[in-house]
Amino acid sequence: MGRGKVELKRIENTTSRQVTFSKRRNGLLKKAFELSILCDAEVALVIFSPSGKAYQFASHDMDRTIGRYRNEVGLPNTQRTRTAEFWRTEIEDLRKLAESLEARHKHLAGEELLSLGLKELKQLERQIKAGVERIRSRKRRLFSEHINLLKIRQKALQDENANLQKMLHEATASSRFWGDLTSNAV
């Protein structure tokens, strides 16, 4: 005696529906595996549960199989399309940024100021004043550091000079001592 024919309609009882989904999902995954082994077929299977959880089986790389499917059906590779669109947008954004920075550079150099209004000119003047003050501050700091290094060098040279004079004085005194000894011995 075989099984009776099952009427295909949505199962209303949520528990029964979940049990049926789980059993049939496992059976479908098993059949996909068997088909790939027995027939050496490239199989990819994706199942989404009613709760949104994904289940998948792929006999080979899933992305490769989906790419083959898209090429066969004639669908564009959306990832490649999205990537190309992303880079086009990125290039356009960078081009706009480069133009903006070039214009700003020219304004800071005092060029092409006719397009600026009073508000922009005042802001540019404040930025230039702040920049000049930062430059002066850095310059003062560098001068101060350089002066300190020169003072340290001067001190070292003075110490070295004092040591050399001391050595010269000792050498002169020693040669007099030896000269006096030799003249007394004769």
Image (cartoon, rainbow, N blue to C red):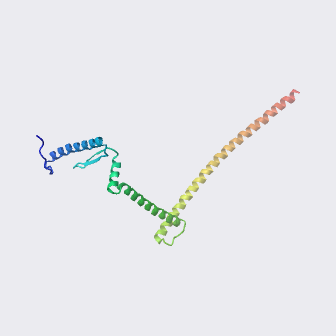
State the image quarter where residue 19 is shown.
Answer: top left
Relative to 165, is 107 on the left or the right?
left
Q: Which residue lies furthest to the left in this view?
A: 1
**Foreground: 63 or 43?**
43
- Rendered location of residue 181, percent (x, y): 84, 29
Relative to 40, is 136 on the left or the right?
right
Q: Residue furthest right?
A: 186
- Rendered location of residue 56, percent (x, y): 28, 46
Q: Which residue is drawn at 62% across and 48% down?
A: 149
Quadrant where the N terminus is found in the figure: top left
- Rendered location of residue 31, percent (x, y): 24, 43
- Rendered location of residue 125, percent (x, y): 51, 66
Labels in figure, total: 0
State the image quarter where residue 177 is shown.
Answer: top right
Q: Which residue is drawn at 42% across and 58% down?
A: 87
Q: Which residue is drawn at 43% across and 62% down?
A: 92
**Foreground: 53 or 3?**
3
Quadrant where the C terminus is found in the figure: top right
Q: Residue furthest top?
A: 185
**Foreground: 36 or 149?**
36
